Image (tube, grey):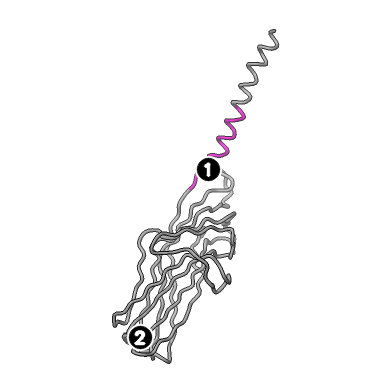
Amino acid sequence: MATMRKALVVVPLALAVQFGSISDAGAVNRHWTSKSYYSTTSHYSKALKRCITVHLTGKLQFRWWRKIPNSQHKDIWIDRVRLSKPRMGIIARTNCHRDGRPAKLTKASLSQRFYDSKCERTTSVSATIPFAVGLSTTKKCGKFRVAKRSSTYGANDYNYWQNNSGRPVTFKPDGLSAKPYKGHKSVCVRADAVVVAYRSNESDSFSRHDKLCVAAFK
C-alpha cells in the first residue's frame, strides 16, 4: 500500500512539470515595428504633352518574434504585415526635367493594388473600406488576390492625391522570416499603381510596379 500511495503522489507532480513546460514554450513575446516607404517615378505622355510623376508613400508595419527567444540568434518570424496610411498622388508638369512647370489636367483616375511580395497564394489578405480584396491581373504574379482602391478626380488641377487613413490592409503570410544577412533583411509587399490622365478630350494611361520594402535589420 505504501508503494501505491507514493505512485499517486509522483504522477501529478510529473504532469505539473510537463504542462508547465508547454506553457513556457508557448509564451512568445511578439513585437510591432513600423517603418516608412516611399517610391516615385515619372512618365511623359506625348498625347497629353504632360509629364506625370507618381508618388507612393505610407508605412509598413510588421509583427515579429525571435525564432530562438532569449538568445543572441537574431533570426525572426513574421506573421502580420500591415499597410498604414497608404497614399498615392500624381503631379503633372510641362516636362520631366527640373524646369518643368505645373500643368493642369482635366481629370485623373488613380488606383493602388497591393499583394504578396513572393506571390505566395497561402498569404491571406484582408482590407477595410475603402479598400476591397479581389482577384486582379498583376505585373508580377499574374491573376492574383490583391487589396485595391481606385479613385477618380474631376477637378481641373495639376496634382491629385488619394489619401487613406488608418491601417486599411493586412497580410497574414505563412512562414515569412527575416535574417540579418544580405538578401534576407527586408519585409516587402508588391504594389501596382495605375494612372489614367485626361486633358480635354484626350486621355492616356500607364502603370508602375514597385516592390516596397523596409529593413527588418540594418
Give SS at disc 1. loop
Q: Which residue is disc 2 drawn over?
A: 93
Is residue 65 within the magenta segment?
no
Determine the image quadrant of residue 54: bottom left
Q: Which residue is disc 1 drawn over?
A: 28
Residue 217, given in percent of the width and then of the height, sits at 52, 58
Q: Name the residue: 65% across, 21% down.
A: 11
Identified by mark 2, the residue type is Arg
How far apart marks 1 and 2 lie (CA) works out to: 52 Å
In the image, 55: left or right of 11? left
Q: Closest to the observer: 93 or 110?
A: 110
Give SS at disc 2. strand
Q: Name the residue: 58% across, 55% down.
A: 174
Identified by mark 1, the residue type is Val
Q: Which residues are magenta?
A: 17-30
Determine the image quadrant of residue 142: bottom right
